[in-house]
Amino acid sequence: MRRLHSIRARLAFVFLFLFLLVLALGVESLGSLSLFNDASAQIRDRWLPAARALGDLNNFTTDIPAVDAALRRAETTTEIAAIERQLAKLDRGIAAAQSAYRQIGHDGTEQLLYEQFEAKWNAYRSMVGRGAVSSFATTAESAERREDTETTSAYAAAAKALELLTDRNVASAREAGELSHLAYLQARNRIGFTILLAALLVAGAMVYVTRSVSAPLVDLAGRMHRLADRETKIEVFGTERRDEIGDMARAVVVFRNNAVDLARSRQALSQQAAMLEERLAAEQRMTLLQRNFVSMASHEFRTPLALIDGHAQRLVSMRERLTADELCDRVGKVRSAVRHMTQLINNLIGSARLTDGRINLQYRPTQVDLAALVREACDTQRELTPDARLLERIESLSLLVDGDAGLLSQLFGNLLSNAVKYSPAGSAIRVIAERSATQIEVAIEDHGIGIPEQDRRRVFERYFRGSNTSGIVGSGVGLSLVKAIIDLHGGAITLDSCEGEGSRFTVRLPARSAQVLSLRADAERQVRGPRAAEH
């Protein structure tokens, strides 16, 4: 049963139908041509030969009277012999024409007319040349006596009979021509109708093949292209068919389901790959932190440890000769080195918290006097680097903010440490702190190596260092930690720098709410005071 519905069977049926259609068209055309051939055969095989034979009879018979008259007027035997030879030649032509006409099939009327002509012609022919041999006349009177009116009447009767036969033949040929033309028209119409019917049937066969075979295949091909383009939400038609197209449709459904499963698997793999990338990034961050710690320990920790060790040895070796002031001075330097190490450790801890995203867990805001905190950061930096020239300009009023004192101290400590690190020894570093109605602004300005223009937009990225810092120890986490602390406090930081001339970092933090209200109240009192005095 399935073979009857297969594409091969359908196409075979269509081709068989087209073959039978061509065969029927050929048979019909041959039949129409046979009818036309039969009609034209009457003209070709009957009327044309008959017309040719009758034409020869007319030509030859019309010459006989003139020859007969010449024979009657002949006076010498030589003339008579020549005319008789001419007459014999005409008789042979007439006999040949009669024989050709008799070989053609004729109807009863034509046969009767021909027999009448033949009888009358024979009668006339028997009269031709009767007196030419029996008597020889040389005078005009004897020639005129040989002209017999009976001969003329016999010829006229024979000519009339031949004329009737020719008219009958022409009329019959005309009828045969009309029949032939009618047969041609009928054959043409039949062939045209057959061609039109064949065209309609071929168009129907093409529509059938298109709808049942071509269109479903094109539709399946389009849906497979959509599947290849990862469009899985498509509907497949034709799965209920019992032919090859049905098999293809069901295969496309399986392909679609596999594509859906593959897409889901790919999504799951993408998620797993993203998780692995995150874990790999975390491992890389930990590795980088460890490498930074080793680098920091080998460079940054070496100086304060050497300082502590040197002072400790001096204290041991000179313990009996040191005065109280010298002892306090050396102990202070040891403590300064310890504070330097503590700051380095705090930077590493803050960097680790920033890397792990846990810096906000250490945020414990309280009321902080930013003026005192900045002064303390400057003093600490002076102890760490005695050669540093820190020039402070801090307002005498308290600069209160809501924030974490430890984080803010680490923020300004990093900015000051960078200013000292990237500036020539003994160069001035200005620290300016002032307030406005809603915020407190702290600027740290140095005259160091500056930051190249192409590096400024990335200077706050984690682990990024400027292209002109080679040979200077650093981890690349200080400014990223500064930016994270400022963001945690709802503030902002801006950078103005010129390579080779220095940098200016400006930190803006929101002032404490109570302080803002107090400043506004003071401003209002100052405005109302002069007005009250005027009144």
Image (cartoon, rainbow, N blue to C red):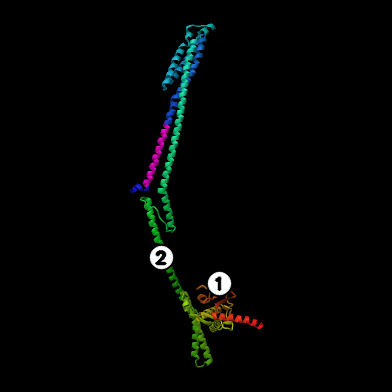
Given residues 336 and 20, the one toward you in this image is: 20
- Residue at the far right: name it: 534
Per the image, label 2 sits on a secondary structure element best described as helix
- Disc 2: CA contacts within 10 A as few (<14), some (14-19) or many (>=20): few
Q: Residue at x 47, y 25 (%)?
A: 174
First to last magenta residue range: 8-34
Q: Nearer the viewer, residue 370 or 207?
A: 207
Please name the amino acid that badge 1 sits on.
Arg
* Observer able to see residue 134: yes
Instruction: Quadrant for the C terminus, please.
Output: bottom right
Q: Is residue 23 magenta?
A: yes
Tell me, for residue 456, which label it has, or none. 1
Residue sitting at the far left: 1
Check residue 40 in the rendering and tell me which mark sits there, or answer none.
none
Number of the front mark, 1 or 2: 2
Reply above or below: 129 against 455. Answer: above
Main SS category, magenta section: helix
Magenta-colored stretch includes residue 523: no
Q: Earlier in the sequence, mark 1 or mark 2?
A: 2
Query: Which amino acid type is shown beneath numbered disc 2?
Result: Ala
Query: Helix, strand or loop at disc 1?
Result: helix
* Picture coordinates of residue 41, whole percent (x, y): 43, 27
Give whichever of 408, 474 is nearer the camera: 408
- Tell whether 382 sits left or right of 46: right
In this rendering, would 71 be left or right of 264? right
Q: Which mark is residue 268?
A: 2
Q: Residue 243 appears at what percent x and percent y?
A: 36, 50
